[in-house]
Amino acid sequence: MIDKLSIIIPAYNEGRTIHMILDKVKAVSLINNIEKEIIIINDCSSDDTEFKIENYIINNPALNIQYLKHETNKGKGAALHTGIGKATGQYLIIQDADLEYDPQEYNDLLKPVVNGFADVVYGSRFMGGNPHRILFYWHTTGNKFLTGLSNMLTNMNLTDMETCYKLFDTKLIQSIELKEKRFGFEPEITAKISRMPDIRIYEIGISYYGRTYKEGKKIGWKDGFRALYVIAKYSLLR
């Protein structure tokens, strides 16, 4: 039985979109009347992200929002560590503060859990018939390469290891010691959950409204090389 879903939103310089993604999260009606707990982690933004968040909280007092702030910029992974530690829902999902992913698809990820099949659900940008913005060939190729390498070392058959949308049993992920402070979170958590006995991992197709670097995309080629190291570190050097 799931009574509450914790929605973890790391934010770094997302003043342009943070209020819009919060509107989208607010608009979602979760299946089975599941309650929403929104946890926003401001990773020491230098723009008006904090102002936008604080105004949003004031103007939406009925929403269950926790606002947390890092005094120094630590990275997306570190922000996720902070948010995961504060989650009180039976399950949690990760939501980027931009508009690349659609919160209306939370229910799609919840269904395998609600129906008793899954402990973890990944949303895949590379399966299903949902909308997918056409952007960078090499970025997509890199994602698929990293997913393939991760799969070889974890013996899983994921199609999108680097996806933002990951739904976890909260107690399960809180029991894992997480170390990666930037975008290495994705391969680290994938490697670590793959070794858990009797873990039930599912994947479902999702939409992807990607953005360009001009529009604010932050992950770059250096993060790809870091992901290679992280995959090897947590899959081979246990």
Image (cartoon, rainbow, N blue to C red):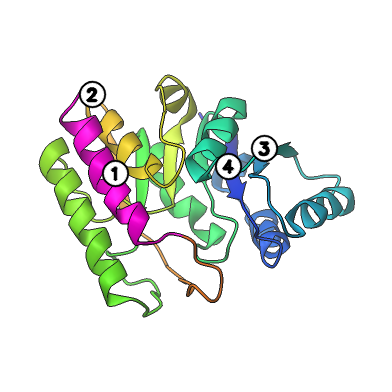
Residue type indicated by callout 2: Asp
* Separation of marks 3 and 2 at Cα, in angstroms: 36 Å
Residue 67 lies, with reference to residue 135, above or below; the image says: above
- Left or right: 104, with 178 as reference point: right
| Residue 228 falls within the magenta-colored stretch | yes
Nearest the viewer among 93 and 112 is 93
Q: Are marks 4 and 3 in contact (CB under 8 Å)?
A: no
Q: Are marks 1 and 3 in contact (CB under 8 Å)?
A: no
Q: Secondary structure at mark 4?
A: strand
Q: Earlier in the sequence, mark 4 or mark 1?
A: 4
Can you give x and y, in whole percent of width and height, for residue 197 in the image? 23, 21
Where does the C terminus fall, quadrant-wise? top left
Nearest the viewer among 165 and 49 is 49
Q: Which mark is residue 202?
A: 1
Determine which quarter of the picture holds residue 198.
Answer: top left
- For the point 50% across and 33% down, which residue is it? 91
The residue carrying pointer 1 sits among few (fewer than 14), some (14 to 19) or many (20 or more) residues within 10 Å by Cα, namely some
Determine which quarter of the picture holds residue 44.
Answer: top right
Q: Which residues are magenta?
A: 219-238
Q: Earlier in the sequence, mark 1 or mark 3?
A: 3
Q: Which mark is residue 8?
A: 4
Q: Are marks 4 and 2 in contact (CB under 8 Å)?
A: no
Q: In this rendering, which labeled residue sits more in front, label 4 or label 2?
A: 4
Residue 77 lies, with reference to residue 50, above or below; the image says: above
Q: Which residue in the protein does label 3 denote?
A: 70
Q: Earlier in the sequence, mark 4 or mark 3?
A: 4
Can you give x and y, in whole percent of width and height, for residue 213 in the image? 49, 72
